[in-house]
């Protein structure tokens, strides 16, 4: 009987505890405060965001959470229970400091954040206190635009497409302008696509440019504007990287043709107005390559193009008469461009001992009577001479 008497109060006590209302185990003090002091915070994408929340006084049993947004569309940013890989407590295990850090902030992290204290009830949670909210704005930190051109160089007069790409923007409204130097280029609206993180946007824009000779000093500019940027982002491209100006080639001699036999003379190859400066020069005599030592290096002109001279020395022997000398130029791995000149030798002058021999022979011919008769017979003059002599004798 005594055992039953001692058991009744314990059972009664357990029933009373089960029937107490939620939170009755700890009285909520009138001095409980939840403080969220930050009104607005601006952070650059990729940085770490710190949101401050502290509590003082005695509060009800229940968790503290961070919510983004309020109402039916809110999102839990941090809770003691759950997996939030980018969010950590500033002071771990603290009962008063519930500040958090969000690393690697992204454009979609912009919004209003609330620190909320909940009270536990049977079957759920009720909001007990919430902070006034912190408005977070995220400034994008996209890298400068990248402007790319053709893989291979292009000749003058060709219309060439250039592409400007940039990423990491939010929201998706992006404006692009193109310039060649200071001149605006008309282009189509850019193509906007979801970025790699599916929460930012990338853009791509194309401009077509007809290449000209003076573009060796020109520059393309792609200018990207966005509502979150204080100044436009600019990407540049030097058109000289896409330009090829093929050379003109000519060969001239330093003496007038024909050339005296055995005289030394020079052929000069003029390679003019080419870009870039990589060029190979070879000399050929009648189609066979000859070795030349004095090939000069290209020289840049004030306009940014290049010039080059190459000289070959030749001895004007009789066997070289009519020889064709070719300057063959290979520029920027293109088909060769050539210039040619022909060597003409002057005929040897007649004089000296051979002339004297001819003169001596002439004298001997005139002094020989037999040869005279032969010449008269050959010319048919002998009969006329005899008649002339007969008439002269009778007179």
Image (tube, rainbow, N blue to C red):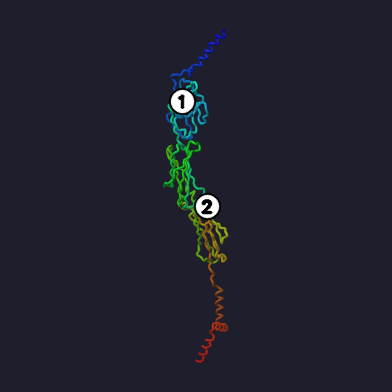
State which tag comes first along the sequence, 1 or 2.
1
Which of the two residues, 88 or 59, is positioned nearer the viewer here? 59
Measured from the top left, where is residue 79 in percent x and y?
Answer: 50, 27
Residue 176 seen by the camera: yes
Give the CA distance from mark 1 to mark 2.
Answer: 69 Å
Q: Quadrant of the N terminus?
A: top right
Q: Is residue 324 above or below residue 176?
A: below
SS class of the residue under badge 1?
A: strand
Judge the density around disc 1: few (<14), some (14-19), many (≥20) Cα neighbours within 10 Å.
Answer: many
Determine which of the numbered discs, if any, sits on residue 243 in the image: none
SS class of the residue under badge 2?
A: loop
Judge the density around disc 2: few (<14), some (14-19), many (≥20) Cα neighbours within 10 Å.
Answer: some
Q: Residue at x 42, y 38 (%)?
A: 227
Q: Is residue 38 above or below residue 303?
A: above
Q: Is residue 334 above or below residue 345?
A: above
Q: Which residue was labeled with disc 2?
A: 332
Q: Residue furthest bottom?
A: 394
Q: Residue furthest top?
A: 1
Which of the two residues, 12 or 213, is positioned nearer the viewer here? 12
Q: Is residue 40 above or below residue 334?
A: above
Which of the two residues, 283 or 228, is positioned nearer the viewer here? 228
Residue 368 seen by the camera: no
Q: Are marks 1 and 2 in contact (CB under 8 Å)?
A: no
* Number of numbered discs: 2
Measured from the top left, where is residue 12 in percent x and y?
Answer: 52, 12
Measured from the top left, where is residue 346 in percent x and y?
Answer: 53, 68
Which of the two residues, 315 or 209, is positioned nearer the viewer here? 209
Q: Nearer the viewer, mark 1 or mark 2?
A: 1
Measured from the top left, where is residue 248 in percent x and y?
Answer: 49, 57
Determine which of the numbered discs, if any, sits on residue 116 in the image: 1
């Amino acid at each position: 009987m005594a055992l039953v008497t001692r058991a009744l109060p314990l059972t009664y006590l357990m029933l009373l505890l089960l029937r107490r209302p939620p939170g009755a185990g700890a009285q909520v003090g009138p001095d409980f405060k939840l403080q969220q002091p930050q009104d607005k915070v601006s952070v650059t994408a990729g940085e770490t965001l710190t949101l401050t929340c502290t509590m003082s006084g005695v509060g009800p049993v229940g968790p503290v959470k961070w919510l983004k947004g309020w109402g039916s569309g809110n999102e839990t940013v941090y809770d003691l229970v759950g997996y939030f890989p980018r969010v950590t407590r500033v002071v771990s295990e603290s009962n008063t400091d519930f500040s958090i850090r969000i690393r690697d902030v992204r454009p979609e992290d912009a919004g209003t954040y609330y620190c909320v204290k909940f009270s536990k009830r049977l079957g759920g949670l009720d909001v007990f206190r919430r902070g006034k909210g912190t408005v977070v704005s995220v400034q994008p930190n996209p890298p400068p635009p990248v402007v790319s051109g053709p893989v291979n160089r292009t000749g003058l007069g060709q219309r060439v497409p250039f592409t400007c790409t940039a990423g990491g923007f939010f929201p998706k409204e992006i404006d692009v302008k193109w310039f060649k130097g200071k001149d605006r280029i008309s282009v189509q609206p850019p193509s906007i696509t979801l970025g790699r993180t599916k929460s930012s946007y990338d853009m791509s824009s194309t401009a077509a440019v007809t290449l000209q000779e003076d573009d060796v000093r020109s520059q393309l500019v792609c200018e990207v504007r966005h509502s979150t940027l204080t100044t436009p982002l600019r990407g540049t491209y030097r058109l000289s990287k896409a330009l090829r100006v093929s050379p003109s080639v000519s060969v001239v001699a330093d003496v007038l043709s024909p050339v005296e036999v055995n005289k030394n003379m020079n052929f000069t190859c003029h390679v003019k107005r080419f870009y870039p400066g990589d060029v190979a020069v070879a000399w050929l005599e009648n189609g066979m390559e000859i070795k030349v030592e004095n090939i000069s290096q290209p020289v840049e002109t004030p306009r940014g193009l290049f010039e080059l001279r190459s000289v070959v020395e030749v001895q004007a022997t009789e066997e070289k008469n009519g020889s064709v000398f070719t300057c063959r130029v290979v520029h920027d791995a293109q088909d060769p461009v050539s210039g040619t000149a022909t060597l003409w030798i002057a005929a040897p002058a007649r004089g000296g001992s051979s002339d004297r021999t001819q003169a001596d022979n002439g004298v001997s011919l005139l002094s020989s009577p037999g040869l005279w008769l032969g010449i008269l017979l050959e010319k048919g003059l002998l009969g006329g001479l005899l008649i002339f002599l007969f008439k002269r004798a009778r007179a």
